[in-house]
Image (cartoon, rainbow, N blue to C red):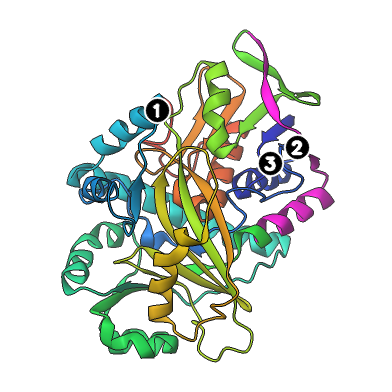
Amino acid sequence: MRVAVLGGGVVGVAAAWMLQRDGHAVTLVERAEGPASFTSFANAGLVAPGHAYAWSSPKAPGMLLRSLWRNDQALRFKPALDPALWRWTLKFLRQCTLERAALNTARKARLCLYSQALLHQVVADSGVTYDARDGGLLYLYRRPESFVGALEKMRVLIDQGIELRSLDPHAASEIEPALAPARGRLAGAIYAPSDESGDARLFTLGLAQACAERGVTFRFGETVTGFRIAGDRVEAARTDRGEVAADAFVLALGVFAPRLARQLGARLPIYPVKGYSVTLPVAGRNNAPTRGGVDEDNLVAYARFGERLRITATAEFAGYSTAHRPADFRHMLAAARDLFPDGGDWAQPSYWAGLRPMTPEGSPILGRGRHANLYYNVGHGHMGWTMACGTAKIVADQIAGRPPEIPLDGMTLH
């Protein structure tokens, strides 16, 4: 079967890998000049089932409100004359109850665990290297009340089979010696020993090369603009360079998917949520962290990639702009430097901002809509790297007529 994958981030390239393994003739179309050039370019790098909590939680509305006059909030709302922003925000707020947050977190955790296992399989089969680090991730709490709340809510993840351990500051600094200077400023930590990290861009570049060696066709620098439809089937994807005909299509276009989906009669509840990223060199530094984690009270994530330290933070509801300025990174850099004063060369930051394709629930949209041969693989939000291999396998199974290996409740259009 001829299958066209629309989108060349980690989600699309993982789908192309799974599809070519099933024997399909796969063509991938990507607007940029290479894979992993947008949302997958400089993300947090955490493969983190142990951090699969839904962002739409009872605390979220307060953060969004305070962000109107404070710039130190992990969630930021920037009002704009964009009806899509207001529609999406109302749907997000409806999910911010204890009951919905627990349900959404459980669904995300199940998918993340499934996907992590498939990531290991893909790496074994492809030989891709990507500055991977296993040995777990640390979730750090500065305030005692935050730590107590975390111990209460982690039960929903434990119930999904994720191992989590409560640590005092001394035990946390034994697992991560680079935390020793900040030990007195921590109330505690949660350790997820099976979580891991790695550079999603390096993984995507390597997997794209492995796909190409196995016959996948890549059409870079080509933007999908619409579809040629006959009845309930898509016959071709229209691009600014012509058409791509196929027997089946996978829509993996991240934040750009809703605009195209409207041509298919679908309203995807996806909106871009902006995140900020800094990468620092660590060569010559003697106390860089050896494993990744999250400063939970500031929602600042960090991960070590070889001789680089990646720091990411913020979820900004601000439309499709990826513009940024050094001031946007001030709070996250201060929080990270407080934890790891000798963690990297703080004088050489490399700044980036990207857009996460978020659904109100935080889980992706998978499977078919009204067209029999078009499959959605979109809306992975802040966990696209963690979820990519799992959703790729799910979509490949659906195209092959196999039942998915995990339940998809809450993750389809129907």
Q: Residue at x 76, y 50 (%)?
A: 211
Are the residues at dot 1 and dot 2 in contact (C-beta closer than 8 Å)? no
Residue 209 inside the magenta-drawn segment: yes
Q: Amino acid at mark 1?
A: Leu
Q: Residues within 10 Å of mark 1 (few under 14, many from 20)?
A: few
- 64 displayed left or right of 81: left
Q: Amino acid at mark 3?
A: Leu
Residue 137 appears in the rendering: no
| Position in image of residue 243 (x %, y %) | 78, 22
Q: Amino acid at mark 2?
A: Val
Callout 3: SS? helix
Q: CA distance from mark 3 to mark 2?
A: 7 Å
| Position in image of residue 35 (x %, y %) | 71, 49
Could you say which disc has been placed on residue 19 in the image?
Answer: 3
**As displayed, is residue 347 above or below residue 376?**
below
Q: Residues within 10 Å of mark 2 (few under 14, many from 20)?
A: many
- 312 displayed left or right of 184: right
Query: Sequence order check: which comes first, mark 3 or mark 1?
Result: 3
| Position in image of residue 16 (x %, y %) | 69, 43
- 225 displayed left or right of 69: right
Residue linked to disc 2: 26
Are the residues at dot 3 and dot 2 in contact (C-beta closer than 8 Å)? yes
| Position in image of residue 105 (x %, y %) | 31, 50
Query: Sequence order check: which comes first, mark 3 or mark 2?
Result: 3
What residue range appears in magenta?
203-230
Quadrant position of residue 371: top right
Q: Residue at x 68, y 41 (%)?
A: 19
Callout 1: SS? loop
